[in-house]
């Protein structure tokens, strides 16, 4: 694809680089603090691509002093259950699944919005 002056497709390379960057942003995990993903995650959040419920509940957990972990909870339990009530994570192993939870530390629980 050379034109008469011998210059190659500069527009192609610009498009190619933009496509690679868009893929990087799309694949960046929301809220990532790992240096390789931090810029992409930050861009995703600023344009509103990180508004899914799991991300928001995870942020609420961390912002209130908790740590996102996983636990074995009942099959009907979704991610980030209310750990201030008994029952969500009290099923037998064959009736359980791994879900994301908020570990608030000793003497605290996650009420679905924050560590209390």
Image (cartoon, rainbow, N blue to C red):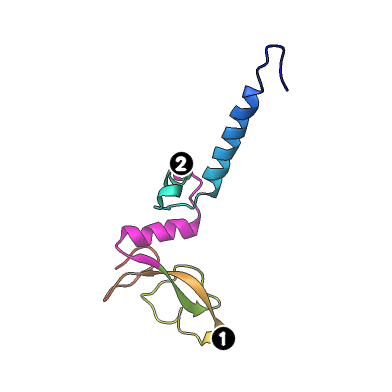
State the separation of the CA atoms marked 2 and 1: 41 Å
Q: Is residue 82 above or below residue 92?
A: above
Span colored in magenta: 45-68
How dense is the environment of label 2, judged by Cα within 10 Å: few (below 14), some, or many (20 and up)?
Answer: some
Q: Is residue 47 magenta?
A: yes
Q: Which mark is residue 56?
A: none
> Which of these two is toward me, 98 or 40?
40
Q: Which residue occupies 54% across, 38% down?
A: 21
Name the element at disc 2. helix
> Which of these two is toward me, 83 or 93?
93
Q: Which quadrant is home to the C terminus?
A: bottom left
Q: Position of residue 91 (x, y in %)?
A: 50, 85
Question: For mark 1, what is the residue?
Answer: 94
Q: Is residue 49 above or below residue 72?
A: above
Q: Position of residue 107 (x, y in %)?
A: 26, 76
Q: Which residue occupies 58% across, 43% down?
A: 23
Question: For mark 2, what is the residue?
Answer: 43
Q: Residue 89, located in which quarter of the rendered image?
A: bottom left
Name the element at disc 1. helix
Q: Is residue 86 magenta?
A: no
Q: Which quadrant is home to the N terminus?
A: top right
Q: Position of residue 38 (x, y in %)?
A: 42, 47
> Which of these two is toward me, 84 or 61?
61
Q: Which residue occupies 33% across, 72% down?
A: 109
């Amino acid at each position: 694809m050379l034109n008469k002056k011998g210059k190659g497709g500069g527009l192609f390379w610009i498009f190619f680089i933009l496509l690679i960057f868009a893929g990087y942003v799309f694949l960046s995990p929301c809220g990532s603090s790992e240096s390789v993903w931090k810029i992409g995650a930050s861009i995703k959040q600023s344009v509103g691509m990180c508004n899914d419920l799991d991300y928001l509940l995870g942020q609420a957990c961390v912002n209130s002093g908790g740590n996102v972990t996983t636990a074995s909870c009942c099959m009907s339990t979704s991610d980030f259950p209310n750990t201030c009530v008994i029952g969500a994570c009290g099923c037998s192993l064959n009736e359980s699944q791994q879900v994301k939870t908020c570990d608030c530390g000793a003497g605290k629980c996650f009420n679905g919005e924050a560590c209390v």
